[in-house]
Image: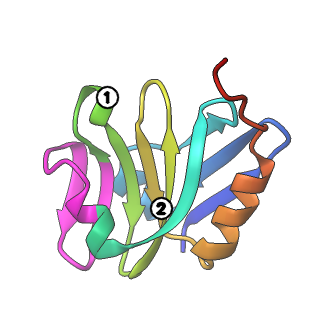
Amino acid sequence: MAVQLRITADGVVVRFTGSDRVWACCRGVYLPLSRVLLARPMKRRDAVSASPRVHLPGVSVPRVLRAGSYGVGERRQLWMVRRADQLLAIYLRGDPYHRVVVEVPDPETTSKTINEALPPRRLPA
């Protein structure tokens, strides 16, 4: 697996290595915690059905590889997933991505770690 994910004090670093850099058309992305809304594990089927169909640039081979940017504007998503059925989805606010979907060894634990690192949210007055 060539997706490396590291949680820092102020963000999440997603790095693509090896051939995944080529497939994703991207070296990776830095996600400030201030932009992260939620991280959660998802089944591949659910993540794909909630994803735009248009890849710009990207590649999609059903059940084998889904990589690159999908959609435009506020629905834009970054993907780097090979054959895994359980994925990690990180929901964001702002540009350039609405959601980042990656394949990691343990999506459940990784999502809990990211969510615990998020700053407390204040309710509107």
Q: Residue furthest left?
A: 54
Report the side of 106 relative to 70 (left or right): right
Q: Residue at x 31, y 28 (%)?
A: 74
Classify mark 2: residues with Cα within 10 Å, few (<14), some (14-19) or many (20+): many
Question: Which residue occupies the foreground of this view, 36 or 68?
Answer: 36
Q: Quadrant of the C terminus?
A: top right
Quarter of the image for residue 112 reads: bottom right
* Total numbered labels placed on residues in the image: 2
Q: Residue at x 81, y 45 (%)?
A: 8
Residue extent of the magenta highlight: 48-68
Residue wearing tag 1:
74
Q: Earlier in the sequence, mark 2 or mark 1?
A: 1
Label 2 to label 1: alpha-carbon separation: 19 Å
Residue 88 appears at what percent x and percent y? Answer: 51, 64
> Which disc is residue 85 wearing?
none
Disc 2 marks a residue whose amino acid type is Val
Report the side of 34 relative to 52 (left or right): right
Residue 29 appears at what percent x and percent y? Answer: 56, 40
Determine the secondary structure under disc 2: strand
Q: Is residue 26 above or below residue 107?
A: above
> Which disc is residue 102 wearing?
2
Residue 45 appears at what percent x and percent y? Answer: 27, 74
Q: Nearer the viewer, mark 2 or mark 1?
A: 1
